[in-house]
Image (spheres, rainbow, N blue to C red):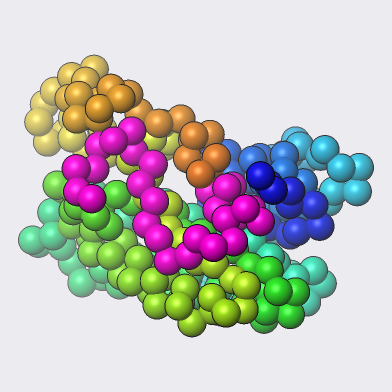
Amino acid sequence: MDLNLNGKHALVCGASQGIGLATAKALAELGADVTLLARRADVLEQVAAQLPRPRASQAHGWITADTADLERLRAQVEALCAGKPVHILVNNSGGPPPGTVRGAEIAAFEAAYRQHLLANHVLAESVLPGMERDGYGRIVNVISTSVKEPLRGLGVSNTTRWAVASWAKTLAAEVAAKGITVNNVLPGSTETPRIEQIIESTMAKTGQDRDAVYAKMAAEIPMGRFARPEETAAAIAFLCSPSASYITGVNLPVDGGRTRSL
């Protein structure tokens, strides 16, 4: 199995923590040069310095960006690609705040679409020319199992995630002949700051303590536990590898069996 990413350049979004950080480490371990993208420069500088370097020539870096500022995001990534084409793009961003779809403000939908759908599109448009030139491209979008089954209490998130999945499926067909794949990884409950946000929201609504909320959520998962970020990162890294060259346009749940639909 060919998992070798030597000579490939990966741009990993949301790379300061959670799944993004674990993915950056996994890709670096496979030999990729990794550029981290997030908002906190101090954290990114430390993470970049600590990423694995199995090759002496590996060069890791970082850029600070806010996915809500699309024009600045575009300019930064185009400047990055001008110096070094990006072969792997991992779109990953924290989800919208929990809440019902009824009563959600229009501004909440607009902010979520901007942060996820529009930012993903801007990033993809910026990196695709280099992928086309080099004949190698992997775009992996970290979304949610709500793409297959809407999750209770995540109204704006459910709506936005579906839009991203549809965009990705459409793009996958358009670029497949160029040696570029586009896939979605759908995490379930994962040990990240995002899941803590959901747990705290549930505690506030139900009055239950953290242990009770956690136990109920874990009981819905056949494996009986939350995922570790590294487990989701492993799936992402495989989809970025040469061995995944004939896999495109798929939604891959990494959820311990929680999703009941096919």
User: From which residue to which does the magenta span run?
Assistant: 236-262
Residue at 39% x, 71% y is 169
x, y percent for residue 171: 46, 77
* Side of 256 where 99 appears, left or right: left
* Side of 74 where 213 appears, left or right: left
* Side of 191 where 58 appears, left or right: right
* Side of 155 where 230 appears, left or right: right
Instruction: State the count of labels.
Output: 0
Query: Residue 242, relative to residue 255: is it above or below?
Result: below
Residue at 75% x, 59% y is 8
Query: Residue 52, relative to residue 142: is it above or below?
Result: above
Regarding residue 5, the answer to whether it shows in the image is: yes
Residue at 72% x, 43% y is 30
Residue at 19% x, 43% y is 260
Query: Residue 114, relative to residue 46: is it above or below?
Result: below
Q: Nearer the viewer, residue 246 or 73?
A: 246
Res. 88 image quadrant:
bottom right
x, y percent for residue 127: 64, 74
Regarding residue 44, the answer to whether it shows in the image is: no
On-image quarter of the N terminus = top right
Reply yes or no: does residue 244 show up in magenta: yes
